[in-house]
């Protein structure tokens, strides 16, 4: 508090961030979140901020290195976490922090991750629920094809799902982690047309 007391553009917020709403905490139109957070709440906190009505323009977080790598995943190695973040913003690795830089040293290495939020998500706002429904279904059974995971996750027949995937220009034998964000967008659009 003393070190930052002279800065009028800095607000220190104390409390359980998962229970606090950015809308209540911050009255500025644009804000940045900079935090060294407990690693066990990383996914929940990022989701909380990305889904808030009043989103930050940027987040700079110290996270477990393995989590940063999952968020930074590219086509072919996507995950539910990567898609959940990348639909809202562009993540970038800013620095790696070896465990030995902390005292006492943790058992894992860390990373500083920045996420620059897009003005609008890559999937239209009114289609985000459908996007997340499809993504959750697609990643519900690892090592299975999209045809099977989407059928089980959506409660649809494999034949219907195959029609959906073909309409989206996606091979039904592919796995969820191989799809790019653009292909997920195509899948959402095809799902809207067939539903």
Image: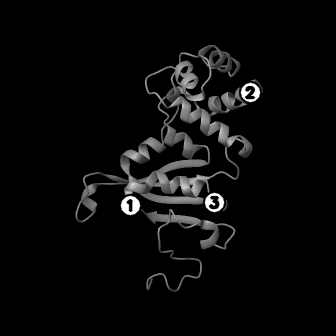
Which tag, 3 or 1, sits closer to the chain's start? 1
Q: Secondary structure at mark 1?
A: loop
Element type at mark 3 = loop
The quarter holding residue 59 reads bottom right
Apparent side of residue 41 relative to residue 33 in the rendered image (left or right): left
- Which secondary structure lies at badge 2? loop
Q: 169 above or below 63?
A: above
Q: Quadrant of the N terminus?
A: bottom left
Q: Residue at x 22, y 64 (%)?
A: 104
Q: Can you identify the residue that label 1 sits on?
A: 38
C-alpha distance separating marks 3 and 2: 31 Å
Q: Which circle, 1 or 2, is nearer the viewer?
A: 2
Locate residue 11: give its quadrant.
bottom right
Disc 3 target residue: 55
Task: Tell which circle, 1 or 2, labels the residue nearer the N-terminal end.
Answer: 1
Classify 10 Å Cα crowding around label 1: few (below 14), some (14-19), many (20 and above): few
Q: Is residue 31 visible?
A: no
């Amino acid at each position: 508090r003393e070190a930052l007391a002279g800065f009028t553009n800095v607000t220190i917020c104390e409390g359980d961030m998962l229970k606090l709403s950015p809308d209540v905490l911050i009255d500025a139109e644009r804000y940045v979140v900079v935090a060294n957070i407990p690693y066990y709440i990383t996914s929940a906190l990022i989701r909380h901020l990305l889904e808030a009505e009043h989103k930050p323009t940027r987040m700079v977080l110290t996270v477990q290195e393995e989590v940063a790598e999952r968020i930074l995943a590219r086509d072919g190695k996507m995950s539910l976490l990567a898609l959940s973040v990348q639909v809202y913003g562009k993540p970038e690795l800013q620095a790696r922090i070896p465990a030995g830089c902390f005292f006492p040293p943790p058992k894992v290495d860390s990373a500083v991750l920045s996420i620059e939020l897009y003005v609008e998500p890559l999937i239209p706002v009114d289609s985000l629920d459908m996007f997340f429904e499809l993504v959750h279904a697609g990643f519900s059974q690892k090592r299975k094809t999209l045809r099977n995971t989407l059928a089980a996750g959506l409660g649809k027949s494999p034949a219907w799902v195959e029609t959906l995937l073909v309409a989206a220009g996606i091979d039904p034998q592919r796995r969820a982690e191989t799809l790019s964000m653009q292909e997920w967008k195509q899948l959402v659009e095809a799902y809207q047309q067939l539903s």
